[in-house]
Image (spheres, rainbow, N blue to C red):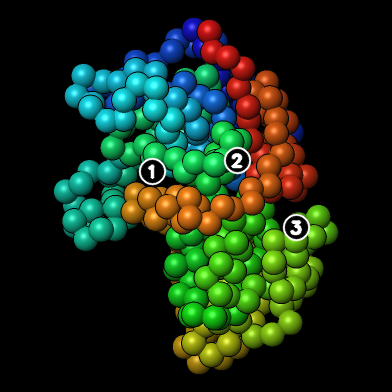
């Protein structure tokens, strides 16, 4: 048996939608690996699932999709990774490999895609299983707690940065500065960008400046932007972010959930070839590229640790913007 947390009754986090349970250790299918979990970062998507913003796809799902662990056992058809290998389990769990999106290299748009911690149990547990072809080899030089946020916050931030079409040496705006943005800012700066951060949190603004942001404000960037990424799930920010773009600028919305966007005025928000686009999950290529970047450029990962028993507290702190960087669950030895 193992300890796990399940989303039992989705609703406001104050109502404690998670429950702590003892359930059997899962068995890997023929193409899967069993991973002994050592750390699991806490993502805002987990919060959306717990609170019902993201409709559950199965009852009593174990959330968590930024999983670091060690391969304990492999399925009958698996040759790699071998038992004992340190791996990461991320959000994208499986795709069909046959549809036109998969064939075109856009597996993140696969209509048959499945996701860790939503379609199948994830990492808020001492063990989890995952398809061997969808786990990642991890960069060295990071602790388990440091590398865990790279598996979603980092990968999604990386894809959002690419979707924002930031030109070389461009001016980038980041709105909301949590787990994903504090990693994306480091990638952008390493690639030569000038980055302006907008956040309500004084602590987040201080962190942004310490990581090299050119400015950090509670209201607006100090100059027009070539590109911008919205990390906060707040639709009312879309119009002012579009207005802050220079001619030909692009705004990428990085979240899986967003509150309603107010009406846009064409001349003010979209004219002069401004672009508004979404970010949907990621491809495995995104994941490999970002983790290779993290190997070449050691990233500073800000984490707030929680024991496994405090998973509900971690989500509550995330909901209340009390987390600096990324919240990460750490695990006792599995029995």
| Element at label 3 | helix
What residue is rendered at 36% in x and 30% in y? 130
**Residue nearer the viewer, 5 or 70:** 70
Alpha carbon separation for disc pair 3 and 1: 29 Å
| Element at label 2 | helix
> Counting residues from the N terminus, which is met first, the one under dot 2 or under dot 3?
2
Residue 17, compared with residue 251, is above or below; it is above
What residue is rendered at 64% in x and 56% in y? 182
Q: Which residue is mark 3?
A: 207
Residue 331, compared with residue 177, is above or below; it is above
Graded by Cα atoms within 10 Å as few (under 14), some (14 to 19) or many (20 or more), the crowding at tag 3 reads some
Q: Which residue is mark 1?
A: 92
As drawn, the residue found furthest toward the right would be 202
Asked if residue 172 shows in the view, the reply is: yes
Asked if residue 265 shows in the view, the reply is: no
> Counting residues from the N terminus, which is met first, the one under dot 3 or under dot 1?
1
Of discs 1 and 2, which sits in the foreground?
A: 2
Alpha carbon separation for disc pair 1 and 2: 20 Å
- x and y, in percent, of residue 220 in the image: 74, 76
- x and y, in percent, of residue 32 in the image: 30, 26
Q: Which residue is mark 2?
A: 146
Quadrant position of residue 136: top left
């Amino acid at each position: 048996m193992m300890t796990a947390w399940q989303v039992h009754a989705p609703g406001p986090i104050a109502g404690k939608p998670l429950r702590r349970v003892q359930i059997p250790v899962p068995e890997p299918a023929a193409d899967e690996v069993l991973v002994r979990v050592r750390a699991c970062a806490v993502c805002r998507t987990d919060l959306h699932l717990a609170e019902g913003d993201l409709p559950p796809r199965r009852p009593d799902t174990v959330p968590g999709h930024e999983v670091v662990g060690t391969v304990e056992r492999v399925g009958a058809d698996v040759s790699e990774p071998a038992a004992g290998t340190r791996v990461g389990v991320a959000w994208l769990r499986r795709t069909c490999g046959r549809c036109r999106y998969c064939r075109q290299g856009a597996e993140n748009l696969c209509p048959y895609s499945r996701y860790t911690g939503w379609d199948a149990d994830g990492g808020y547990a001492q063990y989890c299983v995952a398809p061997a072809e969808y786990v990642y080899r991890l960069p060295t030089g990071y602790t388990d707690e440091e590398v865990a946020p790279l598996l979603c916050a980092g990968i999604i931030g990386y894809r959002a940065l690419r979707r924002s079409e930031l030109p070389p040496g461009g001016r980038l705006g980041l709105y909301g500065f949590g787990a994903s943005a504090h990693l994306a800012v480091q990638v952008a700066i390493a690639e030569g960008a000038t980055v302006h951060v907008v956040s309500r949190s004084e602590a987040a603004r201080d962190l942004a400046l310490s990581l090299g942001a050119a400015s950090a404000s509670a209201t607006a960037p100090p100059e027009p932007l070539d590109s911008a990424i919205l990390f906060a799930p707040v639709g009312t920010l879309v119009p002012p972010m579009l207005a802050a773009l220079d001619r030909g600028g692009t705004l990428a919305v990085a979240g899986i959930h967003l509150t309603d966007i107010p009406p846009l005025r064409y001349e003010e928000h979209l004219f002069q070839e401004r672009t508004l686009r979404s970010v949907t999950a990621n491809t495995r290529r995104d994941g490999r590229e970002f983790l290779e970047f993290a190997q070449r450029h050691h990233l500073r990962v800000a984490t707030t640790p929680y024991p496994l028993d405090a998973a509900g507290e971690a989500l509550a702190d995330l909901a209340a913007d009390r987390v600096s960087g990324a919240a990460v669950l750490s695990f006792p030895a599995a029995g």
